[in-house]
Amino acid sequence: MKKILAVGVICKDNVNELRRTLLSISAQTENAHEVIIVDGSKTPINKKSSNIEDIIKKLKEKKVSINYLIQKGDGIASAFNYVYQNSSSKYLLYLNSGDEFFSTETIKNILPFLEENKSLYCFGSLICNPLKNSIKLAKPSKKIFDIYFKNPFPHPGVIIEIKTLNKVGGFNDELKQCMDYELFIRLLLKYKIKPRIINLVVSIFYVGGTSTNLSSLRKGMKRSWQLHNQEQYYPNVFFRIMFNLRVILYSIIFNIKIF
């Protein structure tokens, strides 16, 4: 039977992080979903870790559909695309390996909202920094204007219709960083897709991955806009100056004290 929600998991050479994510998925009280794992490791993680294989086996015993895909050397954006291209569900939520669901009833709490048949849903994500024992709730922005200055949505809290991903061409394979941000620029400004923002925490996101590397993050955000520089919504000089000032200020604050 076709599932309504797919959970896409991207991993590469990180057994412990993948284990945390899969355990979180396995703990869900609602099993109306499929799991698609895209592994970019030289040696697939499930082949070198019996622990991962045991968790996958338990998921299958719970009637959760599992699709373990191997993809090498094509980059993270391509891996994101590989997930939705191999999904048979209606909606898709991405969790990078290491991320986990906020509670055991997260999927159960999400499903009623998906019955509204919107193209894009934006929930909250709990961003964790275990090294400094601090947390921050990342809420989606209700102001589309914010897209000019920042990524308005925490990507582990975004659920998107797969039909919509097909329509807009998925993630841009050229980008090594900020693929989600560039996608949101297209969805909001080019295709005029308005998100359904919901006050529900979906996932826990751990600081320390590539998405928190400030140097590559800044380059990725700039490159995301460059890909749109022929569009009428491309920000003017004032917006671009404000954007750069904001990124610089964020970098200074982030390096002094994370969150």
Image (spheres, rainbow, N blue to C red):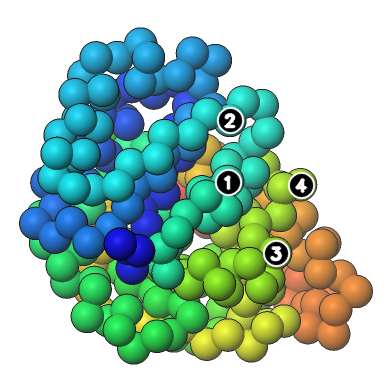
The reply to whether discs 1 and 2 touch (Cβ–Cβ < 8 Å) is: yes
Q: Nearer the viewer, mark 4 or mark 2?
A: 2
- Res 174 visible: yes
- Label 2: state its secondary structure: loop
Residue in the picture at 80% in, 77% down:
234
The residue where tag 2 is placed is 71
Percent position (x, y) of residue 183?
Answer: 63, 65
Residue toward you, 252 or 64: 64
- Label 4: state its secondary structure: loop
The reply to whether discs 1 and 4 touch (Cβ–Cβ < 8 Å) is: no
The residue where tag 4 is placed is 174
The residues bearing labels 1 and 4 have C-alpha atoms spaced at a distance of 14 Å
Residue in the picture at 34% in, 47% down:
35
As displayed, is residue 85 above or below residue 4? above
Marking on residue 82: 1
First along the sequence among labels 1 and 2:
2
First along the sequence among labels 4 and 2:
2
